[in-house]
Amino acid sequence: MPTAHLPACFVDVHVLQSVPVSTLNRDDLNAVKTVDYGGVRRTRVSSQSWKRALREKFQKEIGQFATRTRRIGKAVADALVEKHGWDGQDARWAGAHIVVASGIKFGIEGKPDQEDYEVITNGLVYLPSESIEELADLASEHRDTIKKKKIEKTTDKSRLPTAEVQKIFRRGNAVIHTFGRMLTEVDDAGVDGAVQVAHAFTTHRSDVQVDYFTAVDDLTAEWGETGSGHLSEAEFSAGTFYRFATIDLRELITNMSRARTSASPADIAEDARNIAGAFLSAFIRSLPQAKKNSTAPHTAPDLVHISVRSDRPLSFAAAFETPVRPAQGGGHAAASRSQLVEYAQTATTLMGNDRILAAHWAGTGPDIEGLGDRINSFDALVNTGVEAAFAPREGGA
């Protein structure tokens, strides 16, 4: 689809969301992640953490799935055993041949005749989930050939057709077209992601607190003994988060057009529309699942603003460089909303209001001015934003 048919480059989505006691994201020391911004400490959730939650929800929304793993050989071996009736040893050898034929650097664990034998890629590969079955089918076609050659060292060659294996590794789907793929060792397999996701952070100062907890030993309690069976401590925090992401529609359509050369521009446009809607919906509703069983922090966003831009993304993170102060009666949500709106009006005026092709919002608070028209639900907000993004230019096709 020619990019000239698109009326916009980017769809920005801004979210304010109040999250109660939680530990959404932790560092290598098991501590709540933070960031110093505007001279105060904020709770932070890394983009990688939120993107994983987003990607999992997106996959369900769009109905397509991708698998990221270093153990593609084992995945193929399991498919050969479960769906093709191979014995375990032959399947493990076949999985090794798949990895070697891909051209990706790898390491070997165990010996070929042992159950712990596995060839593992040095880096993560990212494939449509159905590609695992395609690789298993390919291995089955060459079963007699690969049984005669074990992979015992990293210099061994595979007897599988390299071109056919790498063709499968180049395949993409909606997930990969959207989030991208880093796979430099297979020619033309890399995909530039069409989405950008920012680190989320609290709009205000937030202190990390320590929760000291114990677990009672039921039998000890029945026997009348005091004390606990386990004691430990965990960090948690709470606050109103600012979240931002954007989707580059032209990059998305470029990715899809390269992968689906036989598809019509109309079909690609319709699929891109569905992907954009699924992405926006998933971003609004996603929440990292760390410590969910002990915190259940499943809140809805307080405010969601979607803006369709013709030039470049525009984050409103700088609205909170000066930390939000709590309202007189307490609470950061209303003050965060006011601070965001004030900054958004100034920033969009400076950048040029004519660059905004559509702007709408939905939320729990009273009506506000400066973010476009109010929409009653998040689903309707997403639909309105997508329709505006894909509407033809005046006089265009």
Image (cartoon, rainbow, N blue to C red):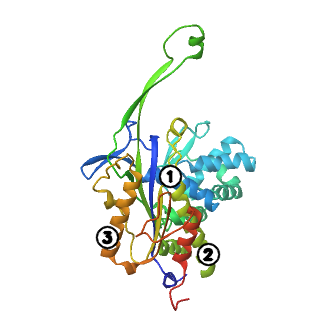
* Amino acid, disc 1: Arg
Give the number of callouts: 3
> Label 2 crowding class (10 Å Cα cut-off): few <14, some 14-19, many 20+?
few
Query: What element does badge 2 sit on?
Result: helix
Q: Report the mark closest to the observer, 1 or 3.
A: 3
* Residue 186 relative to residue 204: left or right: right
Residue in front for this viewpoint, 321 or 340? 340
Q: Position of residue 95 (x, y in %)?
A: 61, 49
* Amino acid, disc 3: Thr
Q: Which mark is residue 346?
A: 3
Residue in front for this viewpoint, 61 or 153? 61
* Residue 177 relative to residue 198: left or right: right
Give the residue at the far front of this rendering. 329
Residue in front for this viewpoint, 287 or 122? 287
Q: Position of residue 328 (x, y in %)?
A: 34, 48
Residue 228 vertical placement versus 97 (above, below):
above
Which residue lies at the image location 66% right of the left edge and 59% below the top edge?
A: 134
Which quarter of the image is occupied by the N terminus?
bottom right
Residue under circle 1?
Answer: 52
Query: What element does badge 3 sit on?
Result: helix
Which residue lies at the image location 60% right of the left edge and 74% below the top edge?
A: 260
Q: Would you identify the image quadrant in which residue 232 lies?
A: top left
Give the residue at the far right of this rendering. 85
Residue in front for this viewpoint, 192 or 63? 63
Residue 384 vertical placement versus 77 (above, below):
below
Q: Earlier in the sequence, mark 1 or mark 3?
A: 1
Q: Which mark is residue 8?
A: none
Q: Which mark is residue 270?
A: 2
Which residue lies at the image location 61% right of the left edge and 64% below the top edge?
A: 164
